[in-house]
C-alpha cells in the first residue's frame, strides 16, 4: 500500500471526488482522501493523501492557500461564478481603475464572509448545494476569514485579474461577489486557479494522466511525497534506539544531550520524531518545565 501524498493538478470538469475515484484506480487502493474541495470549473493544486497519510487530510485543509481568479464586474449569479444563472446585470462602464483598486484592497485582513448556498457546508445534516438545487435558501452565519494578500495582476474592465492568499474556509467566489457589491455593480468569478496549498505548489503538481503514465512504467511511488514534508517547518528529533519502543507506543519521552535542530526547540514547539532508521513516526510537543516530549499525533509504527 502506498503511504504519502500526491500533489495533483485538478483539471476543469473534474470534481474533487472524481480525482479521488480515479486515483483509487491508478494506485489500486481504497484508502485515499483529498484535502479541500475545488469546484468542477476550477483548476489547480489538490493534494491527495494515500494510506496512512490520510491522517494529515485535516491538517492540509487548514493550511493557507493562494489563488488566481478573474473577477467579472456587472453580473451577479446564483452560484457567484460564471456557470450560474444570472440574477442581475448592471452597467459597470462608470467604474474607474482607482474605484476598483480601493474596493479590492479594502478586503485585506479579516472580514466576515457569508458562505454561498452553492457550497458543501451542511445545515441540518444536508449540504447547502443540495438545498440550493431544491430551490431553497437558508440562513447562513457569516464567518471570519483572513485575506493575507490580495493583488490586482491585470485590469481590463469589466474584468479584473486577482491573486489572493487567504485562510482556510475562504470562498473566492464569494469574495468576487462581495467586491462587486461594494462597487455597486455586482460581480462574479469567471475563472479560478489554485496555485498553492500550504507548501504544495502548482509548479510541482501532476495531472492524473501523468500519474497514470508513471503507474504504467512502474514509477508511481517515486512521485509520492512523504508525510513529513507537510511538517517540514517543525524541528526534527532523532530518537535513540533505547527509547524507540516508547516512541512506537506514543509514550512521553525525555531526551538527554540533544544536538542539531533539537537544541533550538522551545517550550510548546511541535517536533517531528524519527526512529534510528530515519523513519518519521509521530509529532510530539515539547514541555520545557518537565523537559518532556508528549505525543500529539502518531503516523507510523513498525
Image: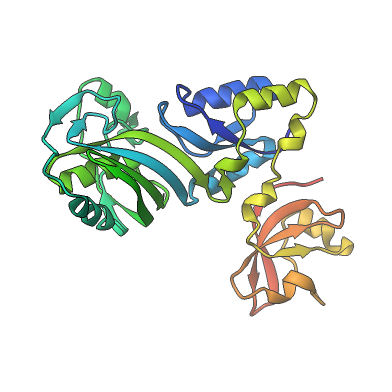
Question: Measured from the top left, where is residue 98 in percent x and y?
Answer: 20, 55
Determine which quarter of the picture holds residue 136. Answer: top left
Question: Measured from the top left, where is residue 105 in percent x and y?
Answer: 27, 57
Given residues 120 and 222, the one toward you in this image is 222
Quadrant of image for the C terminus: top right
Given residues 244 and 206, the one toward you in this image is 206
Question: Which residue shows up at 50% across the image and 36% down it?
Answer: 44
Question: Which residue shows up at 14% across the image and 39% down it?
Answer: 92
Question: Measured from the top left, where is residue 85 in percent x and y?
Answer: 22, 23
Determine which quarter of the picture holds residue 133. Answer: top left
Q: How many marks?
A: 0
Question: Which residue shows up at 80% across the image and 25% down it?
Answer: 218
Residue 108 vertical position relative to residue 76 in the rendered view, above or below: below
Given residues 179 and 235, the one toward you in this image is 179
In the image, 121: left or right of 137? right
Quadrant of image for the N terminus: top right
Instruction: Answer yes or no: is residue 255 visible.
Output: no
Given residues 87 and 137, the one toward you in this image is 87
Residue 257 vertical position relative to residue 196 in the rendered view, above or below: below
Question: Measured from the top left, where is residue 268 in percent x and y?
Answer: 59, 71
In the image, 135: left or right of 216? left
- Residue lying furthest bottom in this view? 289
In the image, 261: left or right of 302? left
Determine which quarter of the picture holds residue 27. Answer: top right
Residue 179 vertical position relative to residue 244 in the rendered view, above or below: above
Instruction: Answer yes or no: is residue 277 visible.
Output: yes
Amino acid at each position: 500500500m502506498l503511504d504519502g501524498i500526491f500533489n495533483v493538478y485538478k483539471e476543469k470538469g473534474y470534481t474533487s471526488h472524481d480525482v479521488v475515484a480515479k486515483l483509487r484506480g491508478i494506485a489500486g487502493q481504497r484508502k485515499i482522501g483529498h484535502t479541500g474541495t475545488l469546484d468542477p470549473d476550477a483548476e489547480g493544486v489538490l493534494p491527495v493523501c494515500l494510506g496512512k497519510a490520510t491522517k494529515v487530510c485535516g491538517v492540509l485543509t487548514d493550511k493557507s492557500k493562494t489563488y488566481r481568479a478573474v473577477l467579472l464586474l456587472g453580473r451577479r449569479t446564483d452560484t457567484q461564478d460564471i456557470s450560474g444563472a444570472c440574477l442581475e446585470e448592471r452597467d459597470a462602464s462608470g467604474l474607474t481603475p482607482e474605484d476598483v483598486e480601493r474596493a479590492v484592497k479594502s478586503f485585506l485582513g479579516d472580514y466576515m464572509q457569508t458562505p454561498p448556498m452553492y457550497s458543501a457546508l451542511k445545515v441540518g445534516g444536508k449540504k447547502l448545494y443540495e438545498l440550493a438545487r431544491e430551490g431553497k435558501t437558508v440562513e447562513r452565519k457569516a464567518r471570519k476569514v483572513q485575506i493575507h494578500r490580495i493583488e490586482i495582476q491585470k485590469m481590463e474592465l469589466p474584468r479584473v485579474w486577482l491573486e489572493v492568499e487567504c485562510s482556510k474556509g475562504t470562498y473566492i467566489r464569494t469574495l468576487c461577489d462581495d467586491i462587486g457589491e461594494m462597487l455597486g455593480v455586482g460581480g462574479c468569478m469567471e475563472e479560478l486557479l489554485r496555485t498553492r496549498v500550504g507548501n504544495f505548489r502548482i509548479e510541482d503538481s501532476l495531472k492524473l494522466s501523468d500519474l497514470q503514465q508513471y503507474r504504467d512504467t512502474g514509477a508511481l511511488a517515486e512521485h509520492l511525497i512523504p508525510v513529513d514534508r507537510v511538517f517540514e517547518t517543525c524541528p526534527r528529533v532523532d530518537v535513540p534506539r533505547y527509547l524507540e519502543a516508547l516512541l512506537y507506543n506514543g509514550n512521553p519521552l525525555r531526551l538527554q544531550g540533544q544536538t542539531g535542530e533539537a537544541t533550538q526547540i522551545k517550550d510548546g514547539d511541535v517536533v517531528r520524531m524519527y526512529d534510528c532508521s530515519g523513519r518519521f513516526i509521530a509529532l510530539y510537543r515539547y514541555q520545557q518545565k518537565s523537559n518532556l516530549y508528549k505525543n500529539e499525533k502518531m503516523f507510523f509504527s513498525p
